Amino acid sequence: MGSVVNEMLSLVYRMLPEVGEIRVSRVCIGVGYTGVKLENGCAGVCQSLLSEQISHCWTVRDAGRLAGETAASLANLAKSWRVSESVVGVATLNALSQMLLDRWEGYVVREGNLFNYIRERVGGDDIVGVVGYIRPFVNILQKKVKRLYVFERNPMLFGEHVLPDTACEDLLPEADVVIVSGTAIANKTIDHVLRLSQGAREIGVVGPSACLIPEPLFKRGVTVIGGVKAVNADRLLEIIMEGGGTPQIKPTVKFVNILQDVDEKA
């Protein structure tokens, strides 16, 4: 089994044979998100992850030449170990995944916020691990579950419930429910995090950075993906360019959940 990113790329190439002809019309790299718009109007985003980039890797080496490139070329940047380039690749993968939402067999696509889905599936006896500080989940789960672990790379966010992400090694295997930020795809931690989460009954990958490409994640134990679909691509990229974050981009997207089709599985 290869990496999640490699499998996502292979799946997109197989299901979109025209990917080598689809051009990218705009790339915006903001302080909160990076956005990519394709010439067909589809757009995708990924958190820019500036806090994870050392100063000499903030720049994108091909800046000034990204617009006009093929979507396949930019999607391949998802494999880069330079985070500044990987986020562009994941945003492009996200844009391409939106073209495939109605093609997934064996999965159900529903509108709605994953926050509500998870809230209904945790109880007072549960140990929950949240990989990446996702504030809405933390605020409600810390009052509802037996124990909450939040794993984060940014030391500015460390606190009572927030631990360094290296603590995943010891604590994540204890979790009954695991919520993983989609940014784990961009910073290349997704494969290891999912291996550590195999004992959980529910695993969700969530956030605007979560690519809506289910198979590589579900085969590794993920039970639900919660991402976004852009409904106003130009406005979305405008907000990103002006430094907007999740609250600002919400009017330009709709929340989408992908779950296994229970009837088909049965």
Image (cartoon, rainbow, N blue to C red):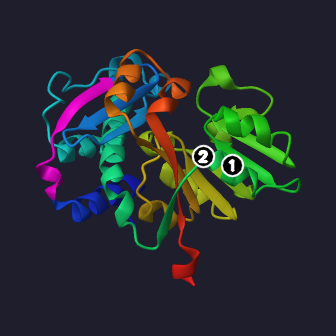
Q: Judge from the rendering whether residue 64 lies leftward or rightward of residue 160; answer left or right.
A: left
Residue 80 seen in this snapshot = no
Q: Position of residue 182 (x, y in %)?
A: 50, 44
Quarter that holds the C terminus:
bottom right
Which residue is found at the position 17% from the left and 61% from the top? Answer: 17
- Nearer-the-camera pick, 212 or 74: 212
Pointer 2: residues within 10 angstroms few (<14), some, or many (20+)? Answer: some
Badge 2 amino acid: Asn
Q: Position of residue 257 (x, y in %)?
A: 53, 54
- When the figure is inspected, residue 252 is found, relative to residue 196, above or below; the finding is above
Q: Which residues are magenta?
A: 18-28
Q: Judge from the rendering whether residue 216 lies leftward or rightward of residue 169; answer left or right.
A: left
Badge 1 amino acid: Asn
Magenta-drawn stretch contains 67: no
Which residue is found at the position 29% from the left and 55% from the top? Answer: 9
Which residue is found at the position 48% from the left and 28% from the top? Answer: 249
Q: CA distance from mark 1 to mark 2?
A: 6 Å
Quadrant in the picture for residue 37: top left
- When the figure is inspected, residue 103 is found, relative to residue 78, above or below; the finding is below
Q: Judge from the rendering whether residue 151 lies leftward or rightward of residue 75; answer left or right.
A: right
Pointer 1: residues within 10 angstroms few (<14), some, or many (20+)? Answer: few
Q: Secondary structure at mark 2?
A: loop
Magenta-drawn stretch contains 23: yes
Q: Are the residues tagged 1 and 2 within 8 Å (C-beta)?
A: yes
The residue pinned by badge 2 equals 113
Q: Position of residue 137 (x, y in %)?
A: 70, 40
The residue pinned by badge 1 equals 116
- Nearer-the-camera pick, 60 or 68: 68
Quadrant in the picture for residue 44: top left
Residue 71 seen in this snapshot = yes
Which residue is found at the position 41% from the left and 21% from the top? Answer: 239
Q: Secondary structure at mark 1?
A: helix
